[in-house]
């Protein structure tokens, strides 16, 4: 973090040089001293400092300046840094104005010119003010700030994107945060600008797209090479493992992710059954380690970017990206994973992003303090989310169609949920309707045993109801099951059209699709085990088959 700032302004350059010299001589080790002779420049600088997250400890302003009187300048400066101490430089004839300013702008001190010697007339007064400021000073967050409304789908999308890409940020609610209101006022922002993102360099993006945010946080959205040995589509556990092994074994490797790395596993608050981590680790931590490992070995990573088509030409695969950029690959590994299935119940779509979320428990959990929260689903992802939410919420209710969780959730999670005093399982229950005004406020539930209906207060609903593969973009040359999962290996032989699309003398490798040189791994593959460990194993195994395929060429 940068040093707090002592900010001085005086239109008399000789006086300005003198005060700056004396301040730097005494305070340069603990404070940054900035000075200017222009009020216009000063106000522009203060806006920039505020947006960057800097902190001004004390203002020292001359009273008589042609652009603006010092008292008026201090009044404007208070808008940017309301907790800074305020000192007025005065001549003997300005004493009355200084005394008046004590009431009008809460002036902390007025300093008579000249102040020689500073050891007697300057430093003791400034020391006392700085000590007082330090006693109440709390360092501000210096990273990215997101300003918007809590129940805004666009705000949720940006928060989810930053969290998924492991980028720290501070959420500021435009309606309730004093810091947000200050930034809004000083930058002249309006509700039409929300959500807006304030970056560390002070730049502000209003209602930005995800690629715009990605560009400002340094994510690579363009490719560097005209052809790659292997392109991996999807940065979940399988894709991350494939990228680590591909790059470490000397293959030019490109990893493409449409949202954020980690997939559904990346949003998990705690993975406790992953080999080698007896106390568990979060999905974000696993993702961070894997991305660091992959990039260290030389994997290129682009995000957010999606693939809309794979075109086959001779032995090469042409990858068509969402922005119509084309790149060539010798082999492709599809690890796009699965998406949460949408709940078609009445009212759900109306409040998605406004109190109803698919996954994303870690992103929205801090806003659930002392609230009534519901989790729909009985799998491990739902259980992990419920445990994490229980740290914040007043009560967490898990809604499942079955009597209990024993047939769908790991026993260690069931035990944890049982011991959580504010978690309750609502068995044999369905959601019939979601309702509210501008955000979710109520759910209508039905008891499947008695058909009895009741309405309950609900501040948030997190949905984990199974998954569908992200394969709609894949062409007919890759055979899929009737549920959309990619078929691989010997299972392809059971399809009547297999021989029509497979033109090799050999049989497909274990993880190879019906298109030679295109492989599938992880949850997107038919017959996958839907476990993080198995996805990692398949991703690394896919690279072994990539080597075998490339050796044929």
Image (cartoon, grey):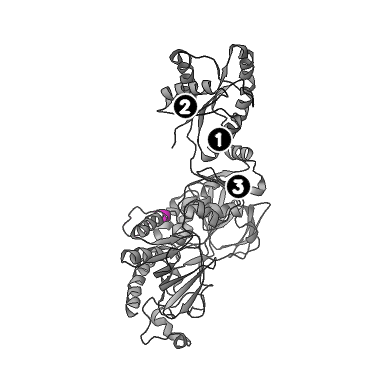
User: Which dot marks residue 423?
Assistant: none
Mark 2 or mark 3: whose residue is earlier in sequence: 2
Q: Position of residue 445 (x, y in %)?
A: 61, 59
Quarter of the image where one finds residue 119: top left
Q: Is residue 203 magenta?
A: no
Q: Specify the segment rendered in magenta.
A: 269-284
Q: Secondary structure at mark 3?
A: strand
| Screen quadrant of the N terminus | top left
> Real-space Cα distance between discs 3 and 1?
25 Å
Which numbered disc, 1 or 2, marks the residue closer to the eye? 1
Residue assigned mark 3: 148
Q: For mark 3, does the 10 Å Cα neighbourhood hold few (<14), some (14 to 19), or many (20 or more) residues?
A: many
- Tag 1 residue: 45
How many badges with numbers are in the image? Answer: 3
Q: Which mark is residue 134?
A: 2
Tell me which label, 3 or 1, sits earlier in the chain: 1
């Amino acid at each position: 973090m940068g040093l707090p700032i002592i900010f001085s302004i005086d239109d008399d350059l000789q006086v300005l040089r003198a005060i700056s010299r004396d301040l730097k001589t005494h305070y340069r080790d603990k404070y940054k001293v900035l000075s200017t002779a222009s009020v216009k420049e000063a106000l522009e600088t203060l806006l920039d400092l505020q947006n960057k997250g800097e902190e001004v400890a004390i203002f020292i302003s001359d009273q008589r300046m042609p652009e603006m009187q010092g008292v008026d300048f201090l009044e404007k400066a208070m808008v940017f840094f309301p907790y800074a101490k305020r000192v007025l430089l005065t001549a003997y004839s300005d004493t009355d104005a200084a005394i008046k300013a004590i009431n009008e702008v809460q002036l902390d001190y007025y300093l008579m010119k000249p102040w020689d010697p500073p050891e007697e007339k300057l430093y003791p007064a400034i020391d006392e003010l700085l000590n007082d400021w330090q006693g109440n000073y709390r360092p501000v967050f210096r990273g990215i700030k997101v300003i918007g409304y809590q129940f805004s789908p666009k705000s949720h999308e940006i928060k989810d994107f930053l969290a998924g890409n492991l980028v720290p940020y501070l959420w500021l609610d435009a309606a309730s945060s004093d810091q947000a209101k200050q930034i809004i006022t000083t930058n002249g922002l309006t509700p039409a600008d929300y959500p807006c993102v304030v970056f560390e360099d002070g730049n502000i993006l209003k209602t930005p797209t995800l690629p715009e945010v990605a560009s400002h946080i340094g994510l690579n959205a363009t490719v560097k090479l005209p052809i790659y040995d292997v392109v991996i589509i999807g940065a979940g556990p399988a894709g991350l493992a494939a990228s680590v092994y591909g790059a470490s074994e000397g293959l030019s490797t490109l990893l493409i992710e449409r949202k954020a790395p980690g997939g559904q596993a990346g949003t998990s608050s705690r993975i406790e059954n992953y080999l080698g981590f007896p106390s568990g680790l979060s999905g974000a931590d696993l993702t961070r380690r894997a991305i660091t490992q992959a990039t260290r070995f030389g994997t290129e990573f682009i995000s957010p970017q999606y693939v809309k088509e794979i075109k086959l030409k001779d032995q090469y695969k042409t990858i068509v990206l969402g922005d119509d950029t084309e790149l060539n690959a010798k082999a492709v590994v599809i690890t796009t994973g699965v998406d949460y299935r949408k709940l078609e119940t009445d009212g759900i779509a109306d409040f998605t992003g406004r109190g109803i979320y698919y996954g994303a428990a870690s992103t929205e959990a801090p806003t659930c303090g002392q609230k009534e929260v519901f989790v729909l689903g009985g799998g491990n992802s739902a259980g992990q989310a419920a445990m994490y939410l229980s740290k914040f919420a007043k009560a967490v209710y898990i809604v499942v169609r079955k009597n209990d969780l024993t047939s769908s959730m790991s026993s260690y999670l069931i035990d944890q949920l049982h011991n959580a005093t504010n978690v309750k399982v609502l068995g044999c229950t369905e959601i019939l309707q979601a309702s509210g005004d501008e955000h979710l406020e109520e759910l209508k539930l039905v008891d499947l045993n008695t058909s009895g209906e009741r309405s309950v207060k609900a501040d948030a609903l997190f949905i984990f109801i199974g998954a569908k593969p992200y394969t709609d973009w894949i062409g007919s040359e890759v055979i899929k099951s009737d549920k959309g999962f990619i078929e691989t290996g010997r299972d392809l032989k059971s399809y009547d059209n297999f021989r029509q699309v497979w033109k090799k003398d050999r049989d497909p490798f274990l993880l190879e699709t019906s298109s030679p040189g295109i492989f599938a791994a992880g949850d997107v593959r038919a017959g996958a085990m839907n476990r993080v460990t198995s996805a990692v194993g398949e991703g690394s195994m896919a690279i072994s088959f990539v080597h075998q395929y490339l050796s044929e060429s």
